[in-house]
Every structure is written in structure tokens, then in C-alpha cells.
Image: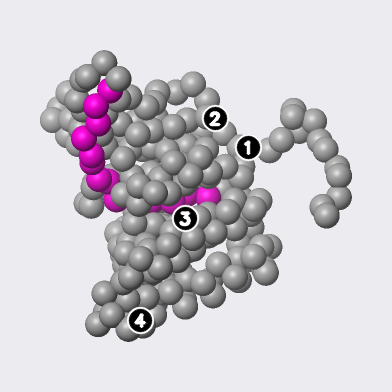
């Protein structure tokens, strides 16, 4: 049993929150990781870290690539190392996993190739992949440092109680665990691109949920922010 040692709420630190950012491929999720304050370790699952080479903060970004050809064993071993050696990872101000949508798909595919169904995953493989994704998030949440996860975007059709229909944008996470997953993060932000007065691209995050956008922000009262301003305090 853990030692009973409560602390005052005013003594809680603000640096170990968990963020989830999501968008369609090519919008700039990986590049956005470069704007996190301090030193960032990017766990590269989908091989998109090359975009960070020319980032203004490149000298503060460090990359660890996961071997996608054997991703189930690689990922389980990595999470086990996080649990055994938290201080190694807490030396970074930010731990970023890029991205969890690809992590699930790759893990599922890997399990399928190791199974007995001609490479096709079975129902148990889906459950295993769900479990390892949630277990991984819980392990990361125990780290005393900031965590940032990226995901692709997907949509569904939703009908409100008053009969209105909406197309909802949401992180590309299996529906069976989506609410559980979002309940374990402090911020879920949709990355969008708009145009400024000069017609140039302007990237920012939607932080407030609507009937057509999954979002969450339990850290402050902002409804949105520029991509450089996702984290505003420590």
C-alpha cells in the first residue's frame, strides 16, 4: 500500500499534465511538438520526425524511433522501461508520442502477422491493442513531466437529443476506449489551419468542445490558442 501523505491543492505542480493533439495527416502535428517549452523527447512511431530537423527549436528536440517492423515487442519493452526507469524520462521537460493512431494500427497488424489467421487480426488482438494503449497512457501519466500525444483525426455522424445531425471531428482512437482515453488526459486539442489577413496559413488549437468537435481543457478557460501557445505555464 502506498504511504498516506496528502498535500495541499495549492502545492500541486503544473508541469506534469497530459495533452492530446489531433488533426488529419499533413496539418502539422509533429512540427507543433517543437514549440513545447524546454527539452522534448519525441517517441517517433510513424517516422514523421524528419520535419523537426529545420524547426527553430531543433537543438532542444531529441528523437527515439520505435522499430515498426516488430512494434508490439518494441513498444511493450519501451513502456516497461518507462515504468522501471522513470528518472531517465523525467530528465526531459516533455515526452511526446507521435502518434498513437499509428501505434494502435501497427500493433494490431503485428499481432495479426504473429497469429494463425493468415495475418488478419482476431478480436482478441483488438482487445490486446486497446489494453496496451490505455496501459501505456497510465504509465506515462505517472511520470513527473509533461506528456504530449498526437493522433490522426476521424469523423462520425452524431444526432443530438433534439434531432439535429452533426459531423463530429475526433481523435482517431477506437470508439470502445475513446472516452476512457480522453478521461486520462488534461487537454484534448484539435489542430486546425486558417488564413490570416494576408492569406497566409495560421495554425491553432481548438480547446473547447462543441457538438461537432471533440476537445477538452481542464487547465484554464481558453477556448483556443495559437500552435505556439498550447502550454502557457509551468
| Residue 4 included in the magenta stretch of the image | no
Q: CA distance from mark 4 to mark 1?
A: 43 Å
Mark pair 3, 2: CA separation: 19 Å
User: Residue at 30% of width from left, 20% of height from top?
Assistant: 161
Pointer 4 with pointer 3, Cβ within 8 A: no
Residue bearing mark 3:
96
* Mark 2 touches mark 1? (CB < 8 Å): yes
Magenta includes 158? yes
**Residue 14 shows which numbered tag?**
1
Kindly report the distance in space between the C-alpha atoms of the residues bearing marks 1 and 3.
Answer: 17 Å
Which badge, 4 or 2, is on the more N-terminal residue?
4
Q: Which mark is residue 206?
A: none
Which colour scheme appears in the figure? Answer: one colour
Q: Nearer the viewer, mark 4 or mark 1?
A: 4
The residue singled out by tag 4 in the image is 115
- Badge 2 crowding class, 10 Å Cα cut-off, few under 14, some 14 to 19, many 20 or more, is few
Q: Give x and y (percent) for residue 107.
A: 38, 69
Q: Which of the two discs, 4 and 3, sits closer to the camera?
A: 4
Which element is circle 3 on? strand
Query: Quadrant location of the N terminus?
Result: bottom right
Residues in magenta, as a range: 147-160
Amino acid at each position: 500500500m502506498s504511504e498516506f501523505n496528502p498535500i495541499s491543492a495549492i502545492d500541486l505542480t503544473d508541469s506534469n499534465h497530459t495533452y492530446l493533439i489531433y488533426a488529419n495527416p499533413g496539418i502539422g502535428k509533429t512540427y507543433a511538438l517543437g514549440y513545447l517549452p524546454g527539452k522534448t523527447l519525441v517517441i517517433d512511431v510513424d517516422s514523421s520526425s524528419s520535419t523537426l530537423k529545420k524547426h527553430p527549436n531543433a537543438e532542444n528536440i531529441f528523437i527515439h524511433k520505435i522499430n515498426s517492423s516488430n512494434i508490439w515487442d518494441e513498444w511493450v519493452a519501451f513502456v516497461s522501461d518507462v515504468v522501471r526507469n522513470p528518472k531517465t524520462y523525467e530528465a526531459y521537460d516533455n515526452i511526446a508520442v507521435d502518434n498513437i493512431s499509428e501505434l494502435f494500427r501497427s500493433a494490431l497488424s503485428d499481432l495479426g502477422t504473429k497469429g494463425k489467421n493468415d495475418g488478419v487480426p482476431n478480436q482478441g488482438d483488438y482487445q490486446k491493442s486497446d489494453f496496451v494503449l490505455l496501459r501505456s497512457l497510465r504509465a506515462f501519466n505517472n511520470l513527473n513531466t509533461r506528456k504530449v500525444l498526437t493522433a490522426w483525426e476521424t469523423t462520425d455522424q452524431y444526432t443530438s437529443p433534439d434531432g439535429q445531425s452533426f459531423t463530429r471531428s475526433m481523435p482517431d482512437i477506437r470508439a470502445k476506449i475513446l472516452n476512457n482515453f480522453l478521461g486520462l488526459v488534461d487537454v484534448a486539442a484539435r489542430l486546425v489551419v486558417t488564413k490570416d489577413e494576408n492569406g497566409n496559413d495560421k495554425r491553432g488549437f481548438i480547446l473547447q468542445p462543441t457538438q461537432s468537435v471533440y476537445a477538452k481543457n481542464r487547465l484554464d478557460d481558453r477556448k483556443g490558442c495559437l500552435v505556439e501557445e498550447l502550454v502557457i505555464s509551468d
